[in-house]
Amino acid sequence: MNRADSVGIVRPQKLFFDTALPLQNGSVLPCFDLMIETYGQLNADKSNAVLICHALSGSHHVAGCYHETDKHAGWWDNMVGPGKPLDTRRFFVVGVNNLGGSHGSSGPLSENPQTAKPYGADFPLVTVKDWVNTQALLADRLGIAQWAAVMGGSLGGMQALQWAIDYPIRLRHALVIAAAPKLSTQNIAFNDVARQAILTDPDFHGGHYAEHNTVPRRGLRIARMMGHITYLAEEGLGRKFGRQLRGDDYQFGFDVDFEVESYLRYQGDKFAESFDANTYLLMTKALDYFDPAREFNNDLSVAVRQTQAKFLVISFSSDWRFAPERSEELVDALLAAKKPVQYVAVQSHHGHDAFLMDDAAYFQAARIYFNNIAKEFAA
């Protein structure tokens, strides 16, 4: 671990909220936990706080490592740290695991206080609005009246947008990266196929697989393999693997012939060992339901009219899951509502996953934007 540009050894914190939480689906959680990590120091007037919202398979572990030999730094370690685009020498950064997650926040793996057993399939469906509401309660707990910024990529960027709409006076900047104002029909279809792979796994048992001492690994593995393909671009996948064979010739069977097959199976196996299937179902459904314009007669410009934050919107040329045109829909709506927005269209061959990658133009845009935010509380 390179300590010079890393936040170093970090420790997660589990915060308990004994407040009943009304959910958008009409149910109520009697209490809940949120798992978080923080980096940097909160300044005296608490004006330098930045909330990082994660994507579908992310977590609170945004940066740093858990021990000296840890080979798995936080998922956005290249973005967050001393001297990095989001510089922890100037900003206090908070990473949070969403409600319904499988990394410590209340979710299907948690104990249901009413039954003293894991929730499993009984954990309620949650939405992006629900997550934002819990994050507002988290801000209250931390004494943060207003975020300097809320930032995220993909599903995380959707949360940043929802924050700006639902809590307009509680953030100054929203960074919406590789996201969209709602899912396309094709994206909803991809999510349903992934869910069907899990739901039809014989080991799923209606979501109560823990009671049967099983895990629907096959379904989760297939769901991840298919999802992973959609996160990559043909150009990038072709550069990395092409039609390279694992052996010297075709095997004339249905095992692995091509390197890309081996890669996808490895990704699927790894994911199935670390991520909860019920959580995957919940997260993809939250993606499907995200549509802030729906409450405003399907007019996005009206939905963003009440926002007070300044926006940075970033898209990537080869992202076909959340194409640049989807980011431009948001930019157009913000401009129509006469809201301040900067838009950066990055050329990249990494597909949707580009928001996680090192890219000079992308990182420079984020760095400049955060430098300008820092001037607000340094003045």
Image (tube, rainbow, N blue to C red):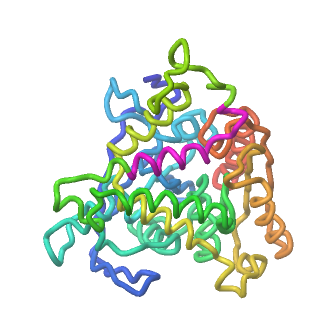
Name the residue: 46% across, 62% down: 283
Coordinates of residue 212 in the picture (x, y in percent): 17, 59
Q: Is the magenta stretch mostly helix, strand or loop?
A: helix
- In the figure, 121 relative to 92: above or below? below
Does 99 appear above or below 44? Answer: below
Over which residues does the magenta segment extend? 219-237
Percent coordinates x, y for residue 75 in the rendering: 49, 41
**The quadrant where residue 101 appears:** bottom left
Residue at point 80% right, 58% down?
325
In this image, 185 relative to 266: left or right?
right
Residue toward you, 109 or 359: 109
On the image, the x and y values in percent for residue 247 come to 51, 15
At x 33% / y 48%, what residue is drawn? 217
Q: 38 and 287: which one is in front?
A: 287
Residue 326 is left or right of residue 332, and the answer is left
Classify the position of the N terminus by image quarter. Answer: top left
